[in-house]
Image: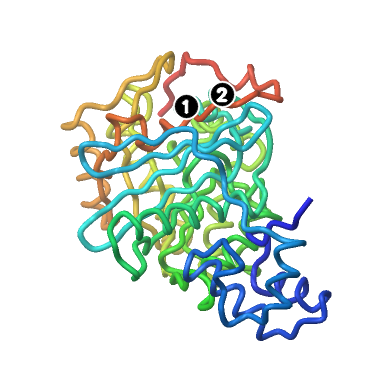
Amino acid sequence: MKTNLLDFDLDGLVAWCQALGEKKFRAVQLFRWIHQRGVADFSQMTDLAKSLRDTLQLLAEVRTLPVVSRHDSADGTIKWMFDVGQGNAIETVFIPETDRGTLCISSQAGCAVGCTFCATGAQGFSRNLSTAEIIAQLWFAERTLRQERGVDERVISNVVMMGMGEPLQNYAALVPALKTMLDDHGYGLSRRRVTVSTSGVVPMMERLGHDCPVALAVSLHAPSDALRNELVPLNIKYPLAELMQACRDYLAHAPRDFITFEYCMLDGVNDSDVHAQALVNLVRPAHTEALPCKFNLIPFNPYPASGLLRSPPERVKAFAALLSEAGIVTTIRKTRGDDIAAACGQLAGDIQDRTDVSGRRAKTIRIHA
């Protein structure tokens, strides 16, 4: 089987090329052709020696993912479903805005965390994606959007690892993908514009801070261990005290001087004034320095059989006001792509579940202050 060059960050591609007897600068040229120009046909890489192009034709390929479907939202959001084999499909979402273009990328086929409000988690977990499968989503979207718009300049300015899966549970494949996104010979994205979202895999947060620090978003969703244990079962393993300390530690390496907390607003579950005050106390404890952070409140995006409801807009606004009055930067996320099930928490793909997470899918949530 041919080697898929999307699997390599630049260091990996240099090592692969050197094993063929090629110098480093040839790997840099090849890397640029693939990621900056979106070229998959080696015969078009005209500044490579013909002998190298012939070798590449024999040994390598730039293999992207087969497209199962595409849906375009009325608001301009685009959702692609990609086939990743063995009956699994993943979803990737492009969100255009006036000042940026954001691509939401999946890292796993399914998710083992099993958050009760997330359609992906409700489907269970099949497998991790490879580095090539992660990067293929960006490679395809960037190439496709440039062709459709008739432009040569970059369309995607921001990447968020907020699609299907828990990125930090696929760490070995994630880091080379991030390095390719950041590399000036690749996509040249700013560390501040690449965000990894995690439900709180504490040991991997520490490793990411040392290996490839990018912006970090933590899926919080509850101010107490009792409630978070039910909404985000990973909290049982890594409770809030450990998670908050990991956030503080990450800031020493992060490209931004704050942590973003994602908070899904669930009607009657986690959206009361008491919950808001508990959040303030969590990030601004009396006994220690406040944790620099901002809150991103996410209106819950329903999916079939979730058994949960979206908090009313007036409740979300009141909740946000309480956080803002405490001096915490708070935004309410505008729902995008919900008409094509591309909004936050709606990505479901088509997953052959290989785990037993039935104990983490209860739809009846007890309410805790």
Which quarter shows the C terminus? top left
In three-dimensional space, the C-alpha distance between marks 2 and 1, rounded to whole angstroms, equals 7 Å
Question: Residue beneath label 2, please?
Answer: 123
Q: Is residue 24 left or right of residue 135?
A: right
At 42% from the left edge and 68% from the top edge, which residue is drawn? 192
Mark 1: few/some/many CA within 10 Å (<14, 14-19, 20+): many
Does residue 133 sit above or below 227 in this rendering? below
At 32% from the left edge and 30% from the top edge, which residue is drawn? 340
Q: Which mark is residue 119?
A: 1
Q: As rendered, which of 309 and 141 lies closer to the eye?
A: 141
Q: As rendered, which of 156 and 121 lies closer to the eye?
A: 156
Residue 299: quadrant of the picture: top left
At 53% from the left edge and 62% from the top edge, which residue is drawn? 248
Q: Is residue 326 left or right of residue 230?
A: left
Q: Is residue 53 left or right of residue 183?
A: right
Residue 252 makes an appearance in the image: no
Q: Position of residue 301 (x, y in %)?
A: 34, 29
Residue 323 makes an appearance in the image: yes
At 74% from the left edge and 85% from the top edge, which residue is drawn? 23
> Which type of secondary structure does the marked residue at label 2 adopt?
helix
> Which type of secondary structure does the marked residue at label 1 adopt?
helix
Q: Position of residue 64 (x, y in %)?
A: 57, 50
Q: What amino acid is found at the position of numbered circle 1 in the picture?
A: Ala
Does residue 310 sit above or below 79 in this rendering? above
Residue 26: quadrant of the picture: bottom right
Q: Position of residue 156 (x, y in %)?
A: 37, 61
Q: As rendered, which of 39 and 296 lies closer to the eye?
A: 39
Identify the coloring: rainbow
Determine whether label 2 and label 1 are within 8 Å by CB: yes
